[in-house]
Image (cartoon, rainbow, N blue to C red):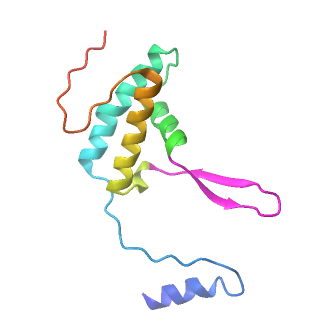
Amino acid sequence: NRNLITDALASYEGKECIIKIEKPKKTRTSQQNRYYWGVMLPIVQRCLKVSGHFMTINDTHELLKLKFLKEIVFIDESTGEVTERIKSTTELSTAQEIEYFGNIQDWTREYFNTEIPDPNEDLTLNFE
């Protein structure tokens, strides 16, 4: 809609801004979401529990977002202050979700000596 674009641009008149045009991205799939909540998060939650950190599945999710989905929003050039935000996993494209999963797998392998299987791998978990 040209009017929406014109109005949006007019609101920045006299200000420095960046205009970004992108192709629409494919959002994460329901399979990716089920794998994340049904496989990855329970494994990470268990690793945290074994290391003495008792967290709910939602807290585990928030921890992983904080660790891997932080992005810089604004840098105040006069003070050097950095403003960041944590992306929601619902914002991730399928490719970004795969990268996020890889970061979690690498971290879990490195810090907990635990492998998180890829989505297409067969798996048997034995939680005692």
Q: Residue at x 30, y 14 (%)?
A: 127
The quarter of the picture where the C terminus appears is top left
Quarter assignment of residue 18 = bottom right
Q: Furthest-left residue in view? A: 122
Question: Does residue 23 lie above or below 120 as drawn?
Answer: below
Question: Does residue 4 lie above or below 76 as drawn?
Answer: below
Q: Residue at x 76, y 54 (%)?
A: 81
* Residue 93 point in image, percent of width and height: 36, 57
Q: Is residue 126 visible?
A: yes
* Residue 98 point in image, percent of width and height: 34, 48
Q: Is residue 56 visible?
A: no
Residue range highlighted in magenta: 69-88
The quarter of the picture where the N terminus appears is bottom left
Q: Is residue 73 left or right of residue 61?
A: right
Q: Furthest-right residue in view? A: 78
Q: Furthest-front residue in view? A: 110
Q: Residue at x 26, y 49 (%)?
A: 30
Q: Is residue 74 left or right of residue 126?
A: right
Q: Residue at x 36, y 25 (%)?
A: 43
Q: Is residue 32 left or right of residue 56?
A: left
* Residue 99 point in image, percent of width and height: 38, 48
Q: Is residue 86 magenta?
A: yes
* Residue 48 point in image, percent of width and height: 47, 21
